[in-house]
Image (spheres, grey):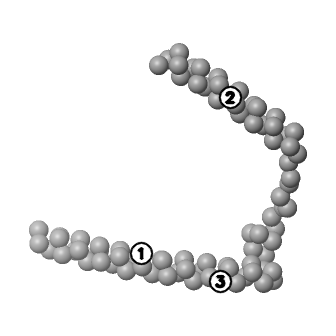
């Protein structure tokens, strides 16, 4: 039984080391990706993204009204069941 607990503790120590190594690798990858997209020379995710669309005031009002209507229906159902 003591041998099993020794193996478990070794595996846990190895897991901590792998986790720390993954953190270092993630940091290195993020740093390299940041360099790649900042100078505009690489094809990063921001380079291929479409430009943001602007929404008219009327469209925002229609969306807000529709959402308020959805919430009113939901709240009415909550009051009936509660």
Left or right of 11? Residue 23 is right
Q: Residues within 10 Å of mark 2 (few under 14, many from 20)?
A: few
Dot 1 or dot 2, earlier in sequence:
1
Residue 27's image quarter?
bottom right
| 2 vs 3, front mark | 2
Compared with 63, 74 (above or below) is above
Which disc is residue 70 wearing? 2
Q: Which residue is mark 3?
A: 32
| 1 vs 2, front mark | 2
Dot 3 or dot 1, earlier in sequence:
1
Q: Residues within 10 Å of mark 1 (few under 14, many from 20)?
A: few
Q: Which residue is mark 1?
A: 19
Left or right of 30? Residue 12 is left
Q: Give the spatial CA distance, label 3 vs label 1.
A: 20 Å
Q: In terms of secondary structure, where does tag 2 sit?
A: helix
Residue ID at (48%, 77%): 23
Residue ID at (86%, 54%): 53
In the image, residue 33 lies at what x, y percent?
67, 79
Residue 17's image quarter?
bottom left
Q: Give the spatial CA distance, label 1 vs label 2.
A: 45 Å
Instruction: Compare residues 45 and 64 and report the one nearer the observer.
Output: 64
Q: In terms of secondary structure, where does tag 1 sit?
A: helix
């Amino acid at each position: 039984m003591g041998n099993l607990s020794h193996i478990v503790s070794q595996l846990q120590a190895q897991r901590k080391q792998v986790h720390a190594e993954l953190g270092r690798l993630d940091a290195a990858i993020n740093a390299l990706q940041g360099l790649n997209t900042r100078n505009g020379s690489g094809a990063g995710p921001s380079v291929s993204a479409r430009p943001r669309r602007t929404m008219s005031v009327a469209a925002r009002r229609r969306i807000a009204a529709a959402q308020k209507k959805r919430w009113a229906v939901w709240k009415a159902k909550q009051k009936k069941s509660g």
